[in-house]
Amino acid sequence: MRADERSRRVCGRRCPRQDLVRFLSRRRSFSFHREGTYSTNTNPATAKLLKKPHINCCSHLLNNEVENWFERTTNIGVGKVAREVHTVMSAVKVSNKNSAVLRKETKLRPLLENKTKWTGRMKMMKNFISMREALIKSSKHENAAIDISNVCSSRFLNEATCLDKMLYDVLLATKTLQEKLIKLSDCREVLDCLIEVANDGEDDPNSHWYESGFQDKYIASDSKKIHNPMFYNGVIKIQNGKQQLTAEEKAACQCLLKEGADLAATSSAKLSVAEKLAARKAKKPRVASEYVNSDFIIGSVAEAERLWSEARHVLTAIRSVMAPATFEEIMLLKKNPTVWNGKLTARAYNIIKDERKVKREKGIKKSK
């Protein structure tokens, strides 16, 4: 089946392309489309169909950058360190003899990397550093068959410690990107802080980032992985209160102009990632702009993913016959507790009660 034929199917029924666009337009009233998963083509295709700008999720961009970082350093650098640690941990975990010998030396259990999440490598590195001495003692036991010749040197320990610190910096940035409704400009600032620290430390022998910087393939401000760079950069400038938009950025951000507005031409000390992220929270004065307040454009889908996690506890197997409208109403009230209270609930109950009473009285009159 061709792509245009597949696009005309909604809920198993054939429908004209115009009806599909009209249906999606009613469901999406925003001026942009934010992706849910970076590796899928569904969201960019939907944004193209709706003729809306598509914004990449900064959390997914950072995750792909870290995965690319490990892939391109498989034979040398951080990727090699993680691979050798994983090999040792696997040799201990899959062997009952090795595990039994290790249990005599420490209560810790070996952890392996997670193929889908880079955070699994960070947990594995911390686990290795904590139980390194126990691994060395276990390897000398007569019943053990643990080869730690590649990981027992002090140089390798230093490399593993540096990798653990680098991954901790990335974790700080990741947690910041997962804040509730974080703006796109704040997400860009978090990524810039991480890039700056990594690039500055790449040439500094005293830094744990020494000779281990990012390639900036995904998280750079001018990355080719950003689908709508003009709209992306324009929104960031608008949220930061800057008026120096280029002609291309102004054309891309026309949907954010206020009604009646017209297009018009308009070296610090080295800090750690934690210090830069703390300084980011300082309030910035907002200046008058011809654009609407675009703080509703967020740079991460973490909030949406949290909503999906909460939704599975509402729409359980016992409630599988729940009507979609009821489910949406429950989730709306659950996620917006500030817009309703007990008085509003009682008022709504009385209104519904009166409406049912009127319908019942009309039914009695008709029966007579």
Image (cartoon, rainbow, N blue to C red):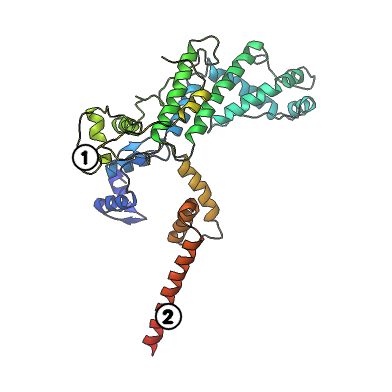
Q: Nearer the viewer, residue 55 or 278?
A: 278
Distance from disc 2 to disc 1, alpha carbons, whole Å, reads 53 Å
> Would you say residue 322 is visible in this rendering?
no
Is disc 2 in contact with disc 1, using a CB cutoff of under 8 Å? Answer: no
Task: List x then y, in percent, for residue 117.
Answer: 53, 32
Task: List x then y, in percent, for residue 233.
Answer: 32, 30
In this view, the mark in front (2 or 1) = 1
Q: Of the two numbered discs 2 and 1 on the same chain, state the one appearing first in sequence.
A: 1
Q: Quadrant of residue 56?
A: top left
Q: Nearer the viewer, residue 94 or 351?
A: 351
> Would you say residue 337 is visible in this rendering?
yes
Q: Nearer the viewer, residue 174 or 157?
A: 174
- Amino acid at circle 1: Ala
Q: Residue at x 79, y 22 (%)?
A: 143
Q: Quadrant of the C terminus?
A: bottom left
Left or right: where does residue 116 sit relative to residue 161?
A: left
Residue positioned most to the bottom:
368
Whether 138 is drawn above or below 366: the answer is: above
Give neighbour class at mark 1: few <14, some 14-19, many 20+ (Cα, 10 Å): few
- Amino acid at circle 2: Arg
Whether 230 is drawn above or below 212: the answer is: below
The image's mark for residue 143 is none
Q: Secondary structure at mark 1?
A: loop
- Residue that mark 2 sits on: 360
Q: Secondary structure at mark 2?
A: helix
- Residue that mark 1 sits on: 261
